[in-house]
Image (cartoon, helix red, strand yellow):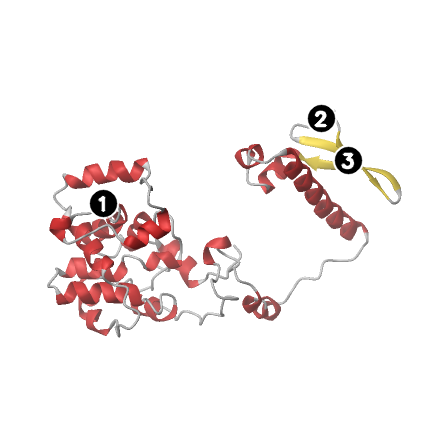
Amino acid sequence: MRVAQADPEPGRQPVSRDNETGRGRMEIDRRAFIASLGGTAAVAAMDSEAKADALEHYMEEQLNDQVAQQGGQPEKFPTVAEIEAQIETRNVRRGAGSLFASGRGNVKKLQPMPKNATLLDFFKLRFDPANHVLQSATRAMKTGMSEEIILACLCHDVVLNLIKPDHGWWGAQLFEPYVPEKTTFAIRYHQTLRFYPDPEAGYEYPDQYYRIFGTDYTPPPHIEATYKMLKNHKWYMEPRLVTVNDLYAFDPNAKVSIDPFMDIVGRHFKQPKEGLGMDNSPSAHMWRTIANPDSPL
């Protein structure tokens, strides 16, 4: 296999290929090939052998597609039932790439969300068991925190069902249209303050982070810059109190429920009458994604 030197079209290269029927010629869209590998940065990190293997694999896929089309055999499209039957054969949900992978076997089929879905519906059908955030909110309630902080503790990590990196910012975006400003602030910045001890507030750096990030871990620049901003902010204690209640909310034997928090949710969560995901808010698309994680597009 060799890549020809001529480039008859921008971004497209002809590739010579020997096969059983003689010498054939396949047009390779260079831009599409590079994009399939994750972009130019990903290609630059590959050694020559890996690039050759990737090109071979790409050509085989293209060849199979062309042969199927030329053979006159129409593609067999699956039915809705057939697609649904495949859900429990995968460990990754179709709509979320590797972020919705199951750590224990295949993913499970989810119950459909009801019409006009509420926050409680999401807790029951998408965030369940939500033990950690329920423990966090329970501790915040028992220690006399404000209702804005209790609500922040209840909601601060549920976005991990959608995405994990920068979950403080993602979580704040998810809830911002519906909760008090201080609650949003606490959710957004608890992620930053987790990395910085505050003995006076009762927060020590968790041993768990040494296991997860390494003993010599240094937070990235945007986290360090955010921490400097927070130290002088009038609402510093809002996200700090979330970290305090977060730290002690990992008891596997704790029995918790969302029921004690429903009055607080009723007072401070602006439930849209159309249902979460159907109200055209800035984060409605995020709620729809959580509601329908098996959607391919």
- Residue 282 appears in view: no
Q: State the image coordinates of residue 199 (x, y, percent, origin top left).
A: 14, 49
Mark 1 neighbour class, 10 Å CA radius: few under 14, some 14 to 19, many 20 or more: some
| Disc on the earlier residue, 2 or 3 | 3
Q: Given the image, on which type of amino acid does mark 2 rest?
A: Asp
Q: Quadrant of residue 208?
A: bottom left
Callout 2 touching callout 3 (CB < 8 Å): no
Q: Position of residue 37 (x, y in %)?
A: 59, 41
Which numbered disc, 1 or 3, marks the residue that appears first in the sequence? 3
Q: Give, as a three-letter code, the residue at label 1.
A: Tyr
- Mark 2 lies on a secondary structure that is loop
Q: Which mark is residue 176?
A: none
- Indicate the quadrant containing the N terminus: top left, top right, bottom left or bottom right: top right
Residue at position x 31%, y 69% in the image = 252
- Look at 46% across and 54% down and name the residue there: 99
**Marks 2, 3: nearer the viewer:** 3
**Residue 31 position (above or below residue 97):** above
* Residue topped by disc 1: 196
Badge 2 density bin: few <14, some 14–19, many ≥20, Cα 10 Å: few
Q: Earlier in the sequence, mark 1 or mark 2?
A: 2
Indicate left or right for 119 with 20 as reference.
Answer: left
Observer-nearest of 188 and 244 = 244
Residue situated in front as seen by the camera: 279 or 254: 254
Q: Secondary structure at mark 1?
A: loop
Residue identifier under label 2: 7
Examine the rendering and report whether any part of residue 102 can be seen.
Answer: yes
Label 3 belongs to which residue?
A: 1
At mark 3, the secondary structure is loop
